[in-house]
Each structure stands twice: as C-alpha cells, then as structure tokens.
Image (cartoon, grey):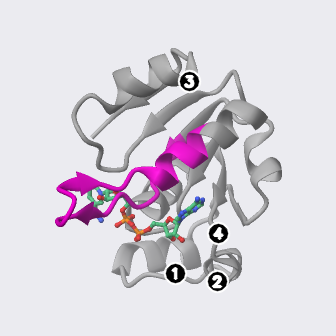
Amino acid sequence: MNIAVVGAGYVGLSISVMLAQKYNVKLLDISSDKIQLINNKKSPIKDEYISKFLAEKNLLLKASTNVQEVLLDADIVFVATPTNYEPEKNYFNVDSVVSVIKEIIQYAPKAQIVVKSTLPVGFVDEYRQKLNINNLHFFS
Ligand SMILES: NC(=O)c1ccc[n+]([C@@H]2O[C@H](COP(=O)([O-])OP(=O)(O)OC[C@H]3O[C@@H](n4cnc5c(N)ncnc54)[C@H](O)[C@@H]3O)[C@@H](O)[C@H]2O)c1
C-alpha cells in the first residue's frame, strides 16, 4: 500500500514516521527547508521521538515538494495542513485543506482522503457534495 501525507508539521510528520516503519510513505510539504531536513533524517520540529526515529529507524519515508511525485501512486492520502481559527470571522480557515483535496482529485482520484486537520462540523458532507466525491473522510 502506498501512503501519502500532506503537511510535514506536528501531525503530518508524526503520522509519517509511525506508518513508514511498515509502509511506503511519501510526505509532501510546501517548505523545501523542511523537506530537505527530513530527507537528511533530521526533524524540522522539536520532538524527541520523531528526531530519534528519523535518525535511527530504517524508515520507508521519502519527502518532497513535488505534488505530482507524491500523489500519483497513492492509495490513501492523509491531509495535515493548517486550519487556523480566525476569531474576527469566527471561522476555521480551511483553504489549505480544500486546495490539497483538489490536488488529490487531480493526481490520485482513486485514493481515499483522510483529513487529520481540525475541521468545522459539516465540512466532509459539504465538500463531498461540492466536489462530487465520496472518498473524503475525517479522522480525529
Ligand atoms: N499539533 C497538534 O497537536 C494537533 C492536534 C490535533 C489536530 N491538529 C490539527 O492538525 C492540523 C495541522 O496541525 P500541525 O500542528 O501539524 O500544523 P503545522 O503548522 O505544524 O504543520 C502544517 C504543515 O503544512 C504545510 N502546508 C501548508 N499548506 C500546505 C499545502 N498547501 N501543501 C502542502 N503542505 C502545506 C506547512 O508548511 C506545515 O509544514 C491543524 O488543522 C491542526 O489544528 C493539530
């Protein structure tokens, strides 16, 4: 099974390191600095276990900034991009998640999409309808 993870922050990197002990994982981020560190087995975030696992375990993990390269053969894609709360609008900004979902529809239309980012209630139903897809899921 080929797994893709989008967003190499606290959530995405934790999922990637855990799953890459057993499965092929490709990790996508827009930050080339983060990608370079991860491919050099160094953690871009402060976390004892992630640092240790990257340095010491034989992980099946490849990080990239190339959307197509990461998504093309993915069977399942975890989305862990930011959804910051905007108090003045009383709204979670889901723009990065929506744009990633559209990239997945383009490059890996058969993949199951599992959003790990924080989402407003009703997001999955709304975007299944809006984008005419049924392979969109949320897992907290
Ligand atoms: N950190 C936590 O403990 C935690 C727990 C539960 C839920 N969450 C939720 O998970 C989501 C991610 O949180 P985090 O703490 O990992 O965030 P983070 O800011 O540490 O990481 C997000 C990553 O996504 C990347 N990114 C942004 N837009 C992108 C795009 N279009 N394509 C590819 N990569 C992109 C950023 O460069 C960054 O590396 C948020 O919605 C957050 O609310 C976080």
Q: Residue 104's x, y, as percent?
A: 66, 37
Q: Is residue 2 above or below residue 87?
A: above
Highlighted range, magenta: 78-101
Q: Residue at x 46, y 35 (%)?
A: 114
Mark 2 vs mark 1, CA separation in Å? 6 Å
**Which of the numbered marks, if any, corresponds to residue 43?**
1
Q: Residue 116's x, y, as percent?
A: 38, 45
Q: Nearer the viewer, mark 2 or mark 3?
A: 3
Numbered disc 2: secondary structure: helix
Numbered disc 3: secondary structure: helix
Identify which amino acid the numbered label 2 is placed on: Leu
**Which of the numbered marks, if any, corresponds to residue 131?**
3
Mark 4 vs mark 1, CA separation in Å? 16 Å
Numbered disc 1: secondary structure: loop
- Tell me if residue 2 can be seen: no
Q: Nearer the viewer, mark 4 or mark 1?
A: 4
